[in-house]
Amino acid sequence: MVDLSIGTPVDASPSVLQAALAAGADAPGYPTALGTPALRTAAADWLARRLGVTVAEPHGPDPSVIPTVGSKELVALLPTLLGLSGSGTVLIPEVAYPTYEVGAVLAGLAVRRCDVPPDDATGVVLVWLNSPGNPHGRVLTDDELRAWAAWGRARGVPVVADECYITLGWDVEPRSLLHPAVAGDDHSGLLAVHSLSKQSNAAGYRAGLLSGDPALVRQAWEVRRHLGLLVPGPVQDAMTAALADDAHVAEQKERYRARRATLLAAVRAAGLRVDHSEAGLYLWATRDEDCWTTIDWLAGLGIVAAPGTFYGPSGARHVRMALTASDERIAAAAERLAG
Ligand SMILES: Cc1ncc(COP(=O)(O)O)c(C=O)c1O
C-alpha cells in the first residue's frame, strides 16, 4: 500500500532542531505561554526575513507573536480564546481543513463556507483564510487578501490566515496576510498562523506561531496562560534554532519539489486533472467523477488518497494526494499509476 492520504512528514527532523532540543533537555521549571524572549526575537526575525512581515514589538506588553503547541490546537481553540463563544458565524473556505469547523462547533458557533467576502455579514464573528490552502494548494492573490482584510476591518471582524504551508510555493510565491502590501502599516484586526511541522519536519515537536494584531494576540495569550497551553521549554529552544536557519527548510523543500514532479507527471499521465496545487504539499486531482469512485480506482492500484468530501461538499469530485511520502513510496505510486 502506498499511503498518500495523510500529510505527515516522513523525513528526519533536521539536526539543527535535534541538537537544540537535546541542549534544552534540562528543564525543571514551567515554560511560559508567552515564549522565551529568544524565541519571540527569532520568530519576529523569521517573519521579516522570510515573509517580509514586520510585526509590532514582540517584547511589548501586548506581544505581537507567541508560540503555539503546533497550529492545530490554535485553529481549534481560537474562537474560544477570543471569547467569541455563544452565537455567531465563522466564515471558512468552501473546501477547507476540517479543524476550522471543529473550532467553531466547540465554541457553539455556526460556520458558513465562502471564498469571497460576502455582501451579507450578519452574525459573522471571525474569518478563516488558508493560503496556501489545504487540500487544494490554492494561493490567494494580493487583491483577494486585501479584499478580505478591508472587509473584516470595515466590520470589526478579525481575519485570520492559516499560512502553515507558506514556505512551500511551487508556481507562485505565497504572500502573508500580514505583508505591508496587504495589511498596510499595522496589523489591526489581522492574525496569521504558522507552523514548523512541515517546513522543518517537526510535526512531532508540536511547534507553531500566532502573530499579528497585538491586542488580539494578547487576548489569546492571556487565556492560553490559564489553560496551560505551554510549548515545552526544549521545544521552544528547538523552534528558536529552527527559525534562525533557512538551510534545512530549503533542503526539505527540494525533496518535496522532486516528489511533486514525479507524482504530478504520473497523475497527469494516468488521465487525472490536477487543479490549483501551485503550493503546499498536496495534489488536488480529479477524474471528473465522484471522489469515492476515484478512491476505489486508486485503492485497486494500491494507493490510498483522501476523498475530497472530507474537506467540504464542493470537494466531492476531487481527491487529495500528499507529497509527504518517501522517495521510494512516491516512485512506487508513480509506477502503479503507469500501470
Ligand atoms: C491547513 C492546516 N492548518 C493547520 C494544520 C496543523 O498543523 P500543525 O498542528 O502540525 O502545526 C494543518 C496540518 O496538516 C493544516 O493542513
Image (tube, rainbow, N blue to C red):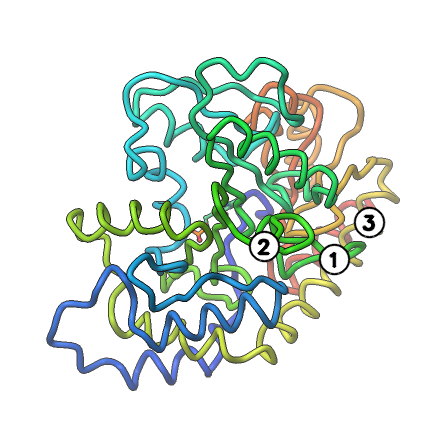
- Secondary structure under the numbered disc 2 in the rendered image: loop
Q: Are marks 1 and 2 in contact (CB under 8 Å)?
A: no
Establish whether ligand 1 lies closer than 8 Å to the Cβ of label 2. Answer: no
Spatial CA distance of label 1 from label 2 is 21 Å
Position of residue 5 measured from the top left corner of the image (x, y, whole percent): 56, 42
Disc 1: which residue: 173
Instruction: Between residue 337 and residue 214, name the one nearer to us.
Output: 214
Nearer to us of marks 1 and 2 is: 2
Decide: few, some or many residues near mark 3? Use Cα within 10 Å; few <14, some 14-19, many ≥20. Answer: many
11, 61: nearer the viewer: 61
Q: Give the class, few, some or many, for how many residues have Cα within 10 Å of label 1's Cα (few <14, many ≥20).
A: some
Question: Residue at 62% across / 39% down in the picture?
Answer: 135
Q: Which residue is mark 3?
A: 266
Disc 2 marks a residue whose amino acid type is Asp
Q: Earlier in the sequence, mark 1 or mark 3?
A: 1
Q: Nearer the viewer, mark 3 or mark 2?
A: 2
Q: Amino acid at mark 1?
A: Glu
Residue at numbered disc 2: 185
Residue depicted at 45% across the width and 25% down the height: 90
Q: Secondary structure at mark 1?
A: loop
Residue positioned 60% across, 18% down in the render: 313
The reply to whether residue 335 is visible in this rendering is yes
Q: Position of residue 325 (x, y in %)?
A: 60, 58
* Picture quadrant of residue 207: bottom left
Is 55 situated above or below 299?
A: below
Q: Is residue 1 visible?
A: no
Residue name at image x 59 percent, y 56 percent = 324
Residue 262 position in % (x across, y down): 79, 58
